[in-house]
Image (spheres, rainbow, N blue to C red):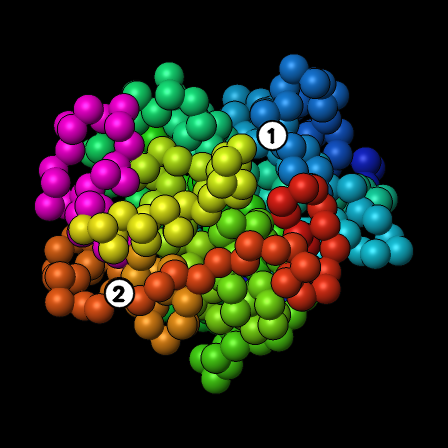
Amino acid sequence: MKFPFCFCSNSDTTLVKNSSHGGQPVQNFRVYSRIELKDASNGFHSKNKVGEGGFGSVYKGRLQDGTIVAIKVLSVELESMRGEREFISELAALSDIRHENLVRLRGCCVDGAKRFLVYDYMENNSLAHCFLGGEHNRIRFSWAQRRDVTLGVARGLAYLHEEVDPHIVHRDIKASNILLDRDFAPKVSDFGLSKLFRDDISHISTRVAGTLGYLSPEYAISGHLTRKSDVYSFGVLLLEIMSGRSVVDFDVEHGEQYLVDKAWEMYNANNLLQLVDPVLNGDFPSEEAFQFARVGLLCVQEKTKLRPRMSIAIQMLTNEIDTVNITISQPGHVADLMDVKIGHRSNSNSFFG
C-alpha cells in the first residue's frame, strides 16, 4: 500500500509521494487546489452541505468536467492534531485500494490549516439517513435490500481485514458510515479512525474510538483493538438493519435498552423471528432471516475468539455454513460511559482516538 502526502496552495499544487513500494504514482488519485473545490461547491455553500461529523462537514460539488463529488472539509486543531489524524488515516487507508463496497477516494488538498478529501458522490446518502429511524423510510427498505446491504458491508470488511496488505481495522462501523449509491449498493466510508495491521500484529492498544452501542466491550474497556472489534460493530449493524430498531433505545420504565440484549432475549425465548422489522409485514424468507439473526448474535459474542472472521460471517450469511449447530453465547456491550478507556468525546455518543 502506498501512502501519499499532499500539499497545495491556491497558486501551486505539489504532490510528494512516500511509498513502501518505491513511491510509484497512485492510480486515479489527484491533488486539487482549494479554488477548484471552492468553485465546485459554490463556496462551500450551506445548501450543498450533505453531511456533518465530529471532524468537519461534507459538501456536494460539481467539478469543471461535470463530475459530481463529495468534498469533506476537515478543520485541523494544531494543538491536538484533531482532523490531521483523520486526514492521514483516510489517505493511508483509501488512496490505493479499490473495492465495490468501499467509498472511492478521488484525491485531496491541503491549504493552511484546512484539509480536503474528495470522494465519489453517493446519491442516496447514508444508510442511517435513507432507511433507518423513521417508519416511513424503513417501509421502503425491503428484505432483499437489507440482505444486499448487509452482504455488501460484510464483503467490504472482509476485504479490509483479510485481503488488503497491511490489513485495515475501520474502528467506526455504524449506519451513518455506510453510504448508498444510486442503486443502493453499500459503500463503507469514513476511515478517519482506521488503523493498519501488518500480518505479524494480532492487536494494538490504543485510545478508544468509535460510537457507543457499536463498541466491542473488550476494546471499549481496555483499548485492546483487533479485527474482531469491527466484527462486533458489524454484528450490531446487522441486527439494526434486519430489525429497524435503534442500537440503544430509551424506555421510561426500563431505561436504556440495548439492541444486542433485546436480540439475546428473543434468542433465549426461541423467538428470533420477532426481531425482524414489523414494517415488512412478514414479507421475508423466514429461514434466511433466522440465519441472519444468528449471525448477528455470533458476531457480538462477548468473547472475541467466539466471533467469526468476516469471511466466515459471509459464508454463514450465504448459507454456505449452517449456524444451527453453533453455540451462541451471551453478547457483551458497554452500558456505562465510565467503563470506556480514557479518551475524548466528539459528541454525545462518539469518541475519537
Q: Is residue 289 above or below residue 51?
A: below
Q: Residue 52's x, y, as percent?
A: 64, 32
Query: Which of the two discs, 2 and 1, labels the residue nearer the N terminus?
Result: 1
Q: Is residue 48 above or below residue 90?
A: above
**Location of residue 62 by image quarter:** top right
- Residue range highlighted in magenta: 271-296
| Residue picked out by circle 2 | 328
- Give the residue displayed 69% in from the left and 42% down from the top: 347
Q: Is residue 226 above or below residue 93?
A: below
Which residue is the extreme one toward the bottom?
200
Q: Looking at numbered disc 2 in the image, what kind of residue is underneath it?
A: Ile
The answer to whether 107 appears left or right of 308 in the picture is right
The answer to whether 247 appears left or right of 220 in the picture is left
Residue 55 magenta-highlighted: no
Q: Residue 80's x, y, as percent?
A: 83, 56
Residue 274 magenta-highlighted: yes
Which residue is the extreme one toward the right?
79
**Quarter of the image containing the C terminus?**
bottom right
Give the number of the disc on residue 263: none
Q: What element carries label 1?
A: strand
The residue lying toward the viewer, choosing from 103 and 219, is 219
Q: Residue 178's x, y, as percent?
A: 45, 41
Which residue is the extreme one toward the front?
253
| Residue picked out by circle 1 | 51
The residue lying toward the viewer, choosing from 351 and 100, is 351
- Give the residue displayed 39% in from the left and 35% down from the top: 245
Crowdedness near tag 1: few (<14), some (14–19) or many (≥20) residues, C-alpha within 10 Å: some
For the question of whether residue 145 can be seen, the reply is no
